[in-house]
Image (tube, grey):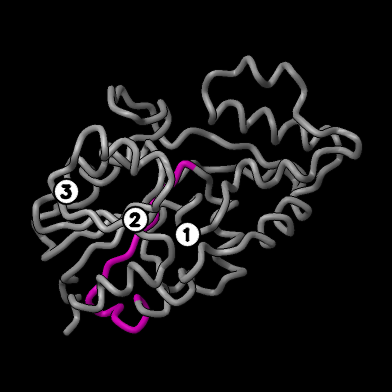
Amino acid sequence: MLKKRFLFIFDFDNTIVNDNTDTYIWKLLPQGQKSLPSQFEKEKHWNKFMRKVLQFYYHNDISVQQIKSCLQEMELTQGFGELFDFIRTNKEQIECIIASDSNTYFIDSILDKQGFKDVIDKIYTNPVQIIDDMEISIFPYHKNDCESTCPRNMCKRTIIMDNYQLTNYEKVCYFGDGKNDYCPGTILRNEDIIFVRKGYGLEKLIQKKDLLCEKVYFESGIDCINRLKNLFL
């Protein structure tokens, strides 16, 4: 297998899709309920919080298929369909992965619907277990002691460092929006690029403490393509 020139790393929520998969499914709350029960607010860790949410859905007869159908209504961030077509065209030179604090079921459901699962080489996210086709049980990807902006169940910097040698690539391109995308940005080199969605938490963190790599701020996938196409001339 020939070595890839480029490693592309994508966040998922509010990066590939134009919303948060975890909160998007709240529209399935039982009729008449506009918010989750108050006991959910006491849970500090988001991964545990979502596990309780999915248990609540199960006990309120909201099926796995209903959740999948809801997720598949989600739209891609503007221009990301074109971005993944661009990646597919140049796939021989690109290794493409997802590192996300969503979960395997949510991401797979959307990738199946959108039709670009073939572009993704590996997905690093929270695992799930489907119980009797009725209940989704979510588990943490790992436990970390990162003191940066990462949740306890996922440090994307650790994921990258454990699985990839960045010096094997001519350039690494990271695409993200949130606070937990800052930590992996700290290991990017001068020659690498971080694509930062405008108006979200990652942009604000970089304004406070800059990163070494090149920054490209985007509103749509077309902005990303306009920078990337120069790599393939």
State the residue position of label 3: 188
Decide: few, some or many residues near mark 3? Use Cα within 10 Å; few <14, some 14-19, many ≥20: many
Q: In the rendered structure, which amino acid carries the disc numbered 2?
A: Phe
Q: Seen in the image, is 207 located left or right of residue 133?
A: left
Q: Is residue 152 above or below residue 75?
A: above
212 to the left or right of 55: left
Decide which of 25, 164 is in the foreground and name it: 25
Q: Residue at x 29, y 74 (%)?
A: 226
Q: Earlier in the sequence, mark 1 or mark 3?
A: 1
Say which quarter of the image contains residue 154: top left
Q: Residues within 10 Å of mark 1 (few under 14, many from 20)?
A: many
For disc 2, the marked residue is 175
Q: Is residue 177 magenta?
A: no
Residue at 77% from the left image edge and 30% from the top image edge: 35
Dot 3 or dot 2: first in sequence order is 2
Q: Circle 1 — which element?
A: loop
The amino acid at mark 3 is Leu
Helix, strand or loop at disc 3?
loop
Q: Which mark is residue 177?
A: none
Q: Secondary structure at mark 2?
A: strand
**Residue at horizontal 25 percent and vertical 78 percent from the top:** 229
Residue 171 position by quadrant: bottom left
Q: Please give left or right for residue 38 compared with residue 156 in the image.
A: right
Q: CA distance from mark 2 to mark 1?
A: 9 Å
Give the residue number, with chain letter if any, for mark 1.
Answer: 16
Q: Residue at x 74, y 49 (%)?
A: 64
Q: CA distance from mark 3 to mark 2?
A: 12 Å
